[in-house]
Amino acid sequence: MTTHLFIAFTLFAVALVYAIVLNAWRDRLRAADPPAVGRSSAAVSMIIPARDAVSTIIPLLQDLHAQDLPKERIEVIVVDDHSTDGTDAVVKAMCARWPELRVLRNSGAGKKAAITTGVQAARYATILLTDADARVGPQRSRHVVEAMEGKGLDLMILPVRTSGTGVLGRLQQEEQAGLTGVALGAAMTGWPTLASGANLAFGRQAFLDLGGYEGDTYASGDDVFLVQRMRKAGRRIGASFDPQVTVTVEAERSWKGFLVQRLRWAGKMRGVRGTWPWASLLVTLLPWALLWGTLRLDVRDLLEVDGVEVMAFMLLGWLLWLVPAVNLVTAVQRTFGARTWPVVTTLCYLLFTLYSPVIAVASLIHRPRWKGRPT
């Protein structure tokens, strides 16, 4: 076997494993169990950590007030994280007409402390997290508590959809669909790691038994680190791909905001343990390795005895890297009810391939601030 053939076959083999995993996740999402309906009497405490959210929290609270779960089985706790824009006053004004709504002052500082404050004050066994800038459908809480109770879960990873316009908005929409597909697909196949704090459910007692976020040194990561702790403790983790439990968040409107958000996301991944960081690194490097393997070939190499095999393995490697990822994103987008264009998804995936390594490296040396605080 020549050097060229060995390199081409190795890259093909890695791409084949990558494709098998992505296809398994896509197939698992397509075969997701339908939710049970009307069989639970469980209640839910919905917790909203909020900092300077006066421009977004009213529509969210209106969504939560419109939930089809009986009002006596819902409480909504807004934990104000020392806002400076009057968020707490807006929520307090709504409390007078909504007995199940409470606003608390964060006993510490940051999102993890705010979540902990809410969990400690919660009355019900199931906790449902929602970011203050999200929008939710009317059946979300009922479907979540029924799934949590029916499956006996300690934590449930839930889907998040990004809504935006223009090139930047579409890029974020495609990226979020990919992240959702990876997070839910991995959880459904027994490898839970990624999650989004914008839409996450867990058992109150399980959270308290594990000490919540005690000992965490990262300001962000309230989602992935909780999944990590639950998994390490042997707790039962599941996921739901039910469109009724999806939350929608607005895309960042500027390239600067887009960059800062991704630096925050990448920064928290430094604290993730296990095989996931190494697998993510391998996936990030795969297209660059394929590019290197392709560029080192010339016409004379392809005319050698094993030239056809080399070319075939390289071509298959590229297809195995690209097609399953596009199919996974497309499957998620269709479930979200979004229009799909494989060409657009392909272009966005190529852009993600270009900027994700840069952001990963930049996050090692730069920690951006978010709403006036370091991340």
Image: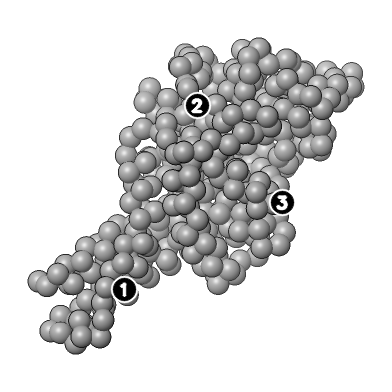
Left or right, 129 with reference to 75? left
Identify residue for label 3: 253
Q: Is residue 293 placed above or below 43 in the rendered structure?
A: below
Q: Amino acid at mark 1?
A: Leu
Tell me the residue that label 1 is attached to.
Answer: 295
- Residue at the location (37% across, 62% down)? 287
Crowdedness near tag 2: few (<14), some (14–19) or many (≥20) residues, C-alpha within 10 Å: some
Q: CA distance from mark 3 to mark 1?
A: 37 Å
**Label 2 to label 1: alpha-carbon separation:** 40 Å
Disc 3 is placed on an element classified as loop
Residue 162: in sight, yes or no? no
Q: Position of residue 114 (x, y in %)?
A: 64, 20
- Per the image, label 2 sits on a secondary structure element best described as loop
Q: Give SS at disc 1.
A: helix
Mark-to-mark CA distance, 2 and 3: 26 Å
Q: Position of residue 87 (x, y in %)?
A: 81, 26
Picture disc at residue 218? 2
Q: Is residue 209 visible?
A: yes
Residue depicted at x 60% and y 18%: 113
Near mark 1 (Cα within 10 A), the count class, few <14, some 14-19 or many ≥20, is few
The residue lying at 53 percent from left, 48 percent from top is 180
Identify residue type, mark 2: Tyr
| In this rendering, position of residue 288 left or right of residue 163 | left
Q: For the C terminus, which image quadrant?
A: top right
